[in-house]
């Protein structure tokens, strides 16, 4: 069988695509980089927010057009859009040949022989994937340590899409990481909806530090990166471990969402402004070169001008290296959908622009300090790559003054900066 793939959404969804693609290849099926001539075109969708749903629908429409033209024989759709809307996907697009759940990805070869809609319940446990490949650069890989979420933030659909929090057994993670390293991965990013809760369901409490310590025992693993930590679960113990080694990039992605207490409370976030500040102050103290990446939501129901100005001041004060801004969107099925004091689209967009402008000023200040400094970098291609401050696919890239072999980790001097565009001179 010849198959092609469109994988949408976050790195957590990409790991699912990598697993079932590798499983098909291991069984002798052929992955086509172009959909023309495919026996089946698989679309692994995202359905987290409205824009992701719209993107998934565009890809489905494009795939069905290819099928109508005779360029692909069969269209199969899976992923979070299916989990969220279930039979509605089939009703909206009756021309789709196969719709299957995330759980059915685990038996992908048998699933693709079927037609119609197949919606198995989410698995209760996560296990070591039988096969794994990288759909991005071979020197960087995502390792999913858990799936699902128990946090129940008021705006979020993830618990409905991915189920309750489920950690992968530690011994399986260690084996998976070893396989990644043996196959050339130099940078392994640990991902989950909440990486800092890793192990709480299996071992009676969070075990991220213990997991990291065990991963570091494997000298084949060159660098680790921590994604998606929650502020009230980023501990002093974790910060001390990060500070103690260069093999964990001095980087952490902590989605904060807001800083004003009234907004955090309505969001059902499990920390307040004081806790957030304590966590960030602790990280900056323990790991002076820590690089912080975060997200904020503007225009959440009831967000006042005073709340927003507090957020602006917070961003000005804490100088995040990378920052994403999202305008709140009313997602059906979430608690926030029915909250009073919804914000107009015009005001949400205005606040979005104001926060981005503040972050632009922050980056200008950071850049003044960066020029002339030496940072650790990783090359994604001969003339471009990232510093330790930049996660793959999410943050920015840098360019090099001369070619470097892809996948190398090395020191480089920052020679110029313009916003997120930075040029480095390799010191190798």
Image: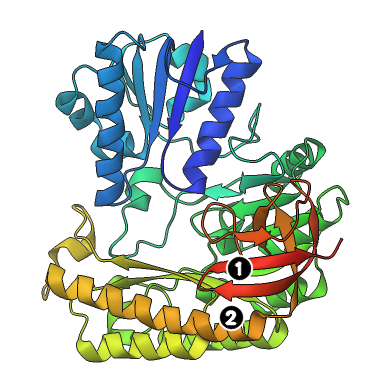
Visible residue check, residue 157: yes
Of residues 403 and 120, the one drawn nearer to the viewer in this rendering: 403
Residue under label 1: 422
Name the residue at 27% across, 11% down: 69
Q: Residue furthest front?
A: 401
Label 2 crowd (10 A; few <14 / some 14-19 / many >=20): many
Name the residue at 46% across, 48% down: 10
Name the residue at 41% across, 23% down: 42
Q: CA distance from mark 1 to mark 2?
A: 9 Å
Label 1 crowd (10 A; few <14 / some 14-19 / many >=20): many
Q: How many numbered markers are drawn?
A: 2
Q: Decide: marks 1, 2 in contact (CB < 8 A)?
A: yes
Of residues 68 and 101, the one drawn nearer to the viewer in this rendering: 68
Please tell me whether residue 381 is drawn above or below residue 425 in the rendered image: above
Residue 51 position, x and y percent, is 27, 50
Residue under label 2: 367
Can you tell which mark lies on residue 174?
A: none
Q: Earlier in the sequence, mark 1 or mark 2?
A: 2
Residue 210 left/right relative to 318: right
In the rendered image, the quadrant that contains the C terminus is bottom right
Please tell me whether residue 298 is drawn above or below residue 145 in the rendered image: below
Residue 101 position, x and y percent, is 38, 29
Q: Callout 2: helix, strand or loop?
A: helix
Q: Callout 1: helix, strand or loop?
A: strand
Residue 403 position, x and y percent, is 75, 51
Name the residue at 28% across, 65% down: 154
Residue 101 left/right relative to 308: right
- Quadrant of the rendered image containing residue 307: bottom left
């Amino acid at each position: 069988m010849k198959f092609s793939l469109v994988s949408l959404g976050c790195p957590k969804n990409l790991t699912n695509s990598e697993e079932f693609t590798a499983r098909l290849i291991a069984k002798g099926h052929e992955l086509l980089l172009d959909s023309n001539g495919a026996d089946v075109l698989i679309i692994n969708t995202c359905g987290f927010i409205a824009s992701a749903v719209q993107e998934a629908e565009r890809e489905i429409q494009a795939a069905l057009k290819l099928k109508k033209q005779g360029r692909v024989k069969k269209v199969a759709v899976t992923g979070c859009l299916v989990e969220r809307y279930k039979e509605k996907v089939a009703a909206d697009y009756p021309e789709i040949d196969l719709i299957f759940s995330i759980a059915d990805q685990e038996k992908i070869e048998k699933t693709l022989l079927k037609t119609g809609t197949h919606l198995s319940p989410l698995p209760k446990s996560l296990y070591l994937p039988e096969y794994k490949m990288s759909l991005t650069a071979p020197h960087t890989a995502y390792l999913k340590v858990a799936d699902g979420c128990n946090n129940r933030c008021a705006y979020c659909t993830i618990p409905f899409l991915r189920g309750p929090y489920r950690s992968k057994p530690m011994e399986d993670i260690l084996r998976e990481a070893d396989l990644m390293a043996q196959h050339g991965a130099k940078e392994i990013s640990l991902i989950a909806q909440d990486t800092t809760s890793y192990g709480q369901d299996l071992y009676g409490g969070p075990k991220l530090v213990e997991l990291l310590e065990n991963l570091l025992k494997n000298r084949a693993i060159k660098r680790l990166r921590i994604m998606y930590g929650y502020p009230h679960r980023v501990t002093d113990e974790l910060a001390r471990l990060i500070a103690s080694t260069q093999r964990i990039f001095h980087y952490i992605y902590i989605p904060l969402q807001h800083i004003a207490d009234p907004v955090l409370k309505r969001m059902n976030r499990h920390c307040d402004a004081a806790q957030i500040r304590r966590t960030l102050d602790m990280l900056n103290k323990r790991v002076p070169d820590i690089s912080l990446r975060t997200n904020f939501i503007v225009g959440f129901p009831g967000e006042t001008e005073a709340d927003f100005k507090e957020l602006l001041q917070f961003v000005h004060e804490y100088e995040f290296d990378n920052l994403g801004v999202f305008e709140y969107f009313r997602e059906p099925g979430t608690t926030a959908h029915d909250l009073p004091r919804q914000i107009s689209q015009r005001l949400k967009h205005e606040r979005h622009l104001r926060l981005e402008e503040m972050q632009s000023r922050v980056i200008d200040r950071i850049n003044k300090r960066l020029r002339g400094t030496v940072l650790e970098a990783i090359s994604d291609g001969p003339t471009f790559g990232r510093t330790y401050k930049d996660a793959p696919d999410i943050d920015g890239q840098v360019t090099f003054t001369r070619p470097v072999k892809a996948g190398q980790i090395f020191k480089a001097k920052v020679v110029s900066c313009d916003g997120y565009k930075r040029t480095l001179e390799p010191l190798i």
